[in-house]
């Protein structure tokens, strides 16, 4: 819903908030991290072997989390 709100603001209202955009990106990254972590727990240690699809996803999601910065700072006060 947050991503749709940001897109609506950009397209219809011609107002673009970098804060809202950053929150949407951070939230999407956090949700992706949680999904990959649940999948890793379900598959077990074999999922972290080189060449496994989950291993690649884990690395990509971790990189996104680091690139976004400290996402917890975006949600303070909510």
Image (spheres, rainbow, N blue to C red):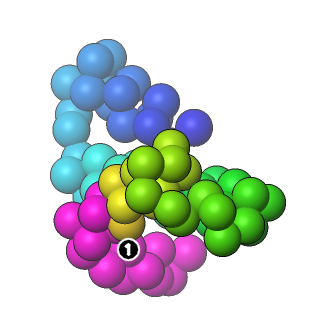
Q: Which residues are magenta?
A: 63-78
Q: Is 19 situated above or below 14?
A: below
- Mark 1: few/some/many CA within 10 Å (<14, 14-19, 20+): some
Q: Is 46 situated above or below 72?
A: above
Return the residue at label 1.
71
Q: Position of residue 45 (x, y in %)?
A: 66, 70
24 falls in the magenta region: no
In this rendering, does residue 61 appear at all? no
14 or 61, nearer to the observer: 61
Q: Quadrant of the N terminus?
A: top right
Prevalent SS, magenta region: helix
In this rendering, does residue 44 appear at all? yes
**Image point 28% across, 18% down: which residue?**
11
**Image point 37% across, 74% down: which residue?**
71
**Image point 53% across, 64% down: which residue?**
48
15 or 22, nearer to the observer: 22
């Amino acid at each position: 819903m947050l991503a749709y709100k940001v897109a609506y603001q950009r397209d219809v209202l011609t107002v673009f908030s970098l804060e809202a955009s950053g929150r949407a990106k951070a939230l999407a990254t956090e949700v992706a991290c949680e999904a990959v972590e649940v999948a890793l727990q379900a598959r077990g240690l074999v999922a972290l072997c080189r060449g496994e699809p989950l291993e690649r996803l884990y690395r990509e999601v971790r990189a996104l989390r680091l690139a976004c910065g400290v996402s917890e700072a975006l949600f303070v006060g909510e």
